[in-house]
Amino acid sequence: MLVVGLMSDFIQRESTNHMNTEIFGIGGMFAASVLLAMPLGRYISNVYSGERTLLDPLFNPLERIFYTISRIDPHIEMGWKQHMQAMLVINLLWFLMSMLILMTQGALPLNPDGNPSMSADLAFNTSVSFLVNCDLQHYAGESGVSYLSQFWLMFLQFVSAATGMAAVVVLFRAFRDKTAQTLGNFYVYLVKSCTRILLPLSLILALVLVFEGTPMTFAGKDTITTLQGDTVEVSRGPAAAFVAIKHVGTNGGGFFGANSAHPLENPSYLSNMVEMVGQMIIPLAMIFAFGHFIRRRKLSWVIFGVMTLGFMVLTIPNVLMEMRGNPAIAQMGVDSALGAMEGKEVRIGAAASGFWSIVTTAISTGSVNAMHDSSMPLSGMNQLLAMMVNAFYGGCGVGLLNFFIYIILAVFISGLMVGRTPEFLGKKVEAQEMKIAMFVALLHPFLILVATGLATAFPAQGASTVSNPGFHGFSEILYEYTSSAANNGSGFEGLGDNTLWWNITTGIVLILSRFLPIIGPVAIAGLMAQKKYIPEGEGTLKTDTGTFGMMIFTVIVIIAALSFFPALALGPIAEYFSMI
Amino acid sequence: MKTHFLHAIMLTLSLFLLLTVIYPAMVWAVAKLAPGKGDGQTLHHAGHTFYRHIGQSFTQDRYFWSRPSAVDYNAAGSAGSNKGPSNEAYLADVHTRIDMLLAKHPGISIAQIPMDLVTASGSGLDPDFSVRAAKVQVERIARIRGIPEDKLIALINTHTTHPLWNMFGPKKINVLELNLALDSVSAR
């Protein structure tokens, strides 16, 4: 009903205003992302399966040098446990290096603005957050980090995205061959993700950005006198390279405090479109890469269909509500044709800001081009839901891993319903796999709800840090933990989150909700890979059909949406009803 | 485990060199060819340097006012107000802004005030405002500067940036550029 009302409201306004260029803009961004993702998916599949690709002449020799220096034999095959060992060890190393750099940055070079070193708890939070591809930021880029630290965080943006991608390739491998004990080499997947996928795409994006006006300089703050005579400072820095991988790797950590709402980080509508395509393209391409890699393209389309359905259900009402504007301000009598402009930029507009807010939460980027804290109540709810599901596309690699858990659950439930042995791609799903899948599926609501409950139970830690009263204040707390558990990184930024409590608790949620949901699905895939292949027959439940797609969608709605409903009712839903 | 550590250390160094030294160096080198040479695009006026993309605070009556800002347009930082849509104190602030606009523009009705002029942007540094935000201020500026209103409307039209390729995104006006043009029409 709400959607129908919004739609008719929208059509009426459309006839009086020329807002359709804002809608075309969204359509253009989405269409371009999907169209580019299809060939990119084929390319990604070829990269991981070792077939010949365009960039071989450049990267084959370079990668050989990397392997020689690191004494890695790229031909050594690993089982799923070895993959996970290698992943955890290298992540631990990055964490330690990160703590060292952030806690001493004040004394290190490339610090023209003289920004101080981080406190231990803030360094812990920041290190973990960038390590796990979340990029929750309890500091502001202008004053909280040196350029050297920005470069280090940029490095983490590359390798954390590559970690997620390497993990999902293990899953690809597990279902390609009839039976497999070994699933490729972790280091090879990691390196190839960086060199052949993330680096070229980032380079293209960065070059567009510098021509649109994003700075790439080592100069520090500039002091200027404005036209009417005020003296202000202007922060700059090597932003273009950083902003590019921030999107391509679905990381989302901003160079400046205001992230992609900042006019230097996102100077124009064109830059906004390019950053949008840049962040959607790998999560979308991964779906197509999967089908190509295991030679089951139809399965890709089922997955794409379910994800797109969920994505649209969240996006469309959000865009309409943001374009309609804040009813409480409209009541005062002003012209609300521009939509809800609090926290939004004129060059981007309400429609593209609303669209971005769902893309960034759905695919776990967490960059923002408008302040989510000032979104309409139910827009905020959809942002939360996108992170609670965390698999309507999802982040680089990990989105598909999360979705795989829902597939396993759907296979099991529908298997029970029709009385057939649950199978996926010719492999039996048995008790062990189900236990892992259930554990991972329930971990997400558990972490979010328990942590939110704790923060709410201690007002000195939770309520005292919120910046808005009432229901919205509760939403700020809920959002912070949801964003952490989804490894998203966006925030209701009114929250005063640089405290010991927030730094430590979100840090713990971040670690648990990153590595367990990677290890879980990879373990399931590894276990299933070793099983005997059962050829498809009359009794097989087909998983690449629309019916099964709807089954997956239903499982997602039941598990993700319903478990969060009580919390949502206390926050955004209550706020919505308080405003009408 | 120990061998993993050895691989990890050397691989990290290799990747660091490629991704954190070579890659940004390439972007930095190309940025030298871009407008502003990678230091941020600037406008020069009467010996002053301004940043084209960084909005400025305009509160004097002789200028087109820019949008409200949570950081007073000091680009040493950047932030939105982060006020929730139902926050009473925030709604009272918006009301104050509306009243102020009405008091300074006796000829306009409340329905002519566009949303962007009474709300703070996401960055606090928004360089733009909407066409309506400019038009609603014409009456005041014409009065103070002694410029005919139709001349100001023409100025607004020439400084309106249309949607990208006339297809994508909203119309907008760079407030600083409009005010610079205003100063070149009349110094008063």
Image (cartoon, grey):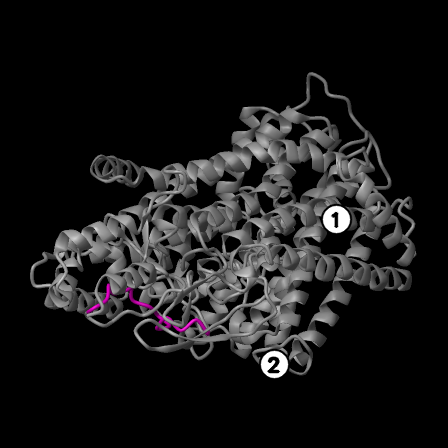
Rendered-image quadrant of the N terminus of chain A: top left
Q: Position of residue A110 (x, y in %)?
A: 65, 75
Residue A119: image tag: 2
Q: Position of residue B167 (x, y in %)?
A: 38, 37
Q: Position of residue A344 (x, y in %)?
A: 36, 57
Local packing at callout 1 (Cα closer than 10 Å; few below 14, some 14-19, many 20+) is: many
Snapshot quadrant of residue A431: top right
| Kind of element beneath mark 1 | helix
Q: Say above or below: A358 vs B49.
A: above
Q: Position of residue B181 (x, y in %)?
A: 29, 60
Q: Say above or below: A70 vs B124.
A: above
Q: Nearer the viewer, residue A191 or B183?
A: B183
Q: Amino acid at mark 1?
A: Thr
Q: Give yes or no for contact between labels 1 and 2 (Cβ–Cβ under 8 Å).
A: no
Answer yes or no: is residue B97 visible. yes
| Kind of element beneath mark 2 | loop
> Would you say the magenta stretch is mainly helix, strand or loop?
loop
Q: Are marks 1 and 2 on the same chain?
A: yes
Snapshot quadrant of residue A40: top right
B153 vs A494, left or right, is left
Answer yes or no: is residue A435 visible. no
The subunit carrying tag 2 is A
Which range is magenta?
Answer: B62-76
Q: Is residue A175 magenta?
A: no
Q: Amino acid at mark 2?
A: Ser
Q: Earlier in the sequence, mark 1 or mark 2?
A: 2
| Residue designated by label 1 | A195
Q: Nearer the viewer, residue B150 or A440?
A: B150
